[in-house]
Amino acid sequence: MSPIEKIISSYRTMLLLLTVYAVGLSAATFIEKAHGSTLAKVLIYYSPLFFLLQLLLIANFVGIIRRRRFIRKKHWSMLLVHFSWVVILSGSVISHLFGVEGTIHLREGEKKNRIHIRSNHGQRMDPLPFEIELERFTLTRYPGSMSPSSYESNLRVYVDGEERKERVFMNNVLDVKGYRFFQASFDPDERGTILSVNKDVAGRNVTYMGYLLLMVGFVGCVVGRNSRLRRLISQLKNHTAVFLFLLCMYPAGVWSMPDRAAIKKAVLQIHIPDEHLARFGSLPVQSMNGRMIPVHTFSSEILRKLHKKSTIDGLSADRFLLSLLTMPEMWMYVPFMALPDNELAEYYDLTKGECAYAELFHPDGTYKLQARIEEAYRKIPTQRSGFDKDLIKLDEQVNIFHQVANGQLLRIFPHETDTNSRWYAPGDDLSAYGGADSVFVSQSFAAYLSEVRRALKSGDWSKADDALQRIRNYQEEKSRTIDIDADRIRLEVMYNKLDPFRRCKIGYLSLGGMMLLLSFILFFKDSRWIRRMLGVLSLGVGTVFAFHILGMGFRWFIGGYAPWSNSYETMVYMAWATALAGFLFMRRNPMTFALATLFAGVILFVSGLNWMDPQINPLVPVLKSPWLMFHVAVLMMAYGFFGISCLIGITSLTMMSVLGKERIKHHARSFRELGIINEIALLAGLMLMTTGTFMGAVWANESWGRYWGWDPKETWALITIVVYTMVSHLHLLPRWYNLWSLNLCSVIAFASVLMTYFGVNYFLSGMHSYGQNDSIQGLFIYLYIIAGIVAVLIVTARKGRFLKMNRIKHNLYET
């Protein structure tokens, strides 16, 4: 074999090429952020060097097959997995060279047979072998909201002498002679449509074949007797491994006005009977996005936006809202509005931490924020300073308080003839109502609040109950366009009161922490009663896990869709997936189960931070696809396994840092067992990550006509696959492969997961904005602290480099 052939077929070459590939992809996402997608495509994605790099990866794979004689050894599953990537890359090349992507803009009654093509070489118009006419465009909004629920184009297609009537809407594609039309956008006047057009029959079929081969290969790797995954599992023994992991994450002069402390004390001591509060909390109200919710949900959302917490000194959200509606003049002086930053308090002379609504106005009634807020809104969002952003948030809180106090957000009155099924709030313009309806909607809520004030003094709540019941009767009588699902309303109130994921967080953290503590004691001295206690705690985790499933089921039923469509929901699901992954390792290694339990609690802790929004929202049109359920569910499962791998790595490095060299040797068996579980988690996560990413590609192709568009989220998902591919192939280099390097790489690799899930939304931008959270920077404080701890562990744990993993005989890569 020539020197060039040896280099091409080398494992070191493979890892080097993958490293260059990952670095190039990551650089492209930042180039796109700074200079646009066109330059990123010219310099990297579609550059000759990038295509050459992919060809070298294929050549490297073929060279390794020949050199290591994998075909003769009949390692079919491994060959199929790697060959599928060759097919997928070939499909992408075919799509790039021969595929057609464009748009067609149609006005109602307009007929066209040409599409608009944009490329790196300019713009052009390409003819179609048929004509297409827009008969009618229909935009459907959520009831009472401006948010689109769906948009649909009714078309006439004139092809081969025939006329066909077709409908195109999100996730419903029109296919004519290989051209596929997707609903992309529409004109502001809602009388025109913009359809994206794609023709890529050959590239799509080749790529889909690659996806299918990949799935078959993964199945073979799981069930095949000679696969590395099965060999790793067979090496596990049913005994307890050793680790120590400690994780502590704790978030961490005014113009004259009435005595705010006395007023706050007074409003907090107001007594409202639980029975009446339950009736008030279950009253249906239409949210601003059109979803029918109970007042209980509305009040919780308002309190979180104003106070950033779910209660005020023990005062529930419903008590707060009814108290605010009844006595707004008192709440104006209560310092409960959370300030984003103390700089605002110093600049405007406000109470630090929490201020009162009245503090934001001068004695003459002028608004303190007026000048600076107008200046902040005039700036381009990317040019706004941190002070500007905090100022905008505070201004939003002020507006919310003002609207709630004036009855402008509580949309409790239906209008039986409103074409958009909008409900009205007591403080809205009610001129749309006439006759007896006008009298009722303009007076009934004020009369109810009057009865509440009387009841607060007399203690007799019967008239207040009657006034509230009259409003409920009106809702049932006049709501003819929206069905008020009483069962769903009651279930949502129950869900809010149970607060299942907060309870699960407490359960996972406390049980996981106790299991870790007992495992640490077991490390020094084996004890039967400790093992029994671990069994009891495991049953407790199972109970919490069942409650977790119940909470997700509640949310699914209430929202009407799989509950993993936004940042909060995906974190809740990721916590569930992590706990589930822990159960898979429970019998093999109880300590890994404890670690997974603790990590599930940490994820729920992050999801419960103030900047996470747990609100249930209607889906945007593109998410109304069954692919959402599978794509996101599989990806979150992958993140759960990667998280377990990362924590096992941190745990092992921590033990290597704490223990002396002789103690490390003494417990080498336990370290190796953790290493085996680490590798299993890596491989499981890699297979799930790859599967979920390509499910997303199929979803994209079926929704808007391209299975890969180098969107930053897509690109970083691919980078994560490449990074974990490198880590999972580290064992091919025995000189570099030891328990220290394995654990180190599993920790560092998790940074790509964090970048994919969080960092893209913060540092970059793209199509996946429906999962975006503008306040995500709050999480980075914790990440920086953890990164510093990990850096220290990497250095202090180097004394464990002598620990080697047990050689797996007859593995896929044995020469």
Image (tube, rainbow, N blue to C red):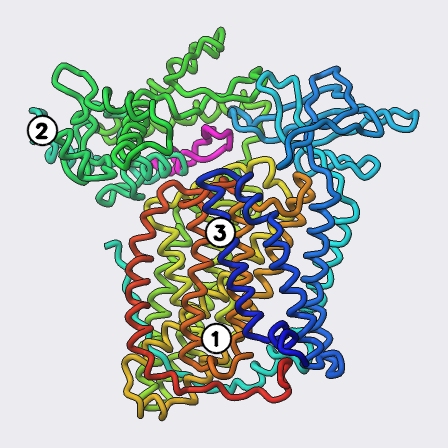
- Residue underneath mark 2: 254
- Judging depth in this view, the residue of 592 and 313 nearest the camera is 592
| Identity of the residue drawn at 54% across and 31% down | 484
Q: Amino acid at mark 2?
A: Val
Of the residues under marks 3 and 1, which one precedes in the sequence? 3
| Identity of the residue drawn at 68% across and 23% down | 105
Residue most extreme to the right: 161
Q: Is residue 427 above or below residue 707?
A: above
Q: Which of the 4 image quarters holds residue 346?
A: top left
Front: mark 3 or 1:
1
- Judging depth in this view, the residue of 448 and 670 nearest the camera is 670
Q: Is residue 601 above or below residue 78?
A: above
| Disc 1/disc 2 C-alpha distance (Å) | 57 Å
**Position of residue 563 in the picture relative to residue 695 (left or right):** left
Q: In the rendered image, is residue 815 in sight?
A: yes
| Disc 3/disc 1 C-alpha distance (Å) | 24 Å
- Residue underneath mark 1: 678
| Disc 2/disc 3 C-alpha distance (Å) | 43 Å
Q: Amino acid at mark 3?
A: Thr
Q: Secondary structure at mark 3?
A: helix
The total number of labels drawn is 3
Q: Is residue 295 magenta?
A: yes
Q: Answer yes or no: do the residues labelled 3 and 1 have beta carbons within 8 Å?
A: no
| Quadrant containing the N terminus in the rendered view | bottom right
- Residue underneath mark 3: 570
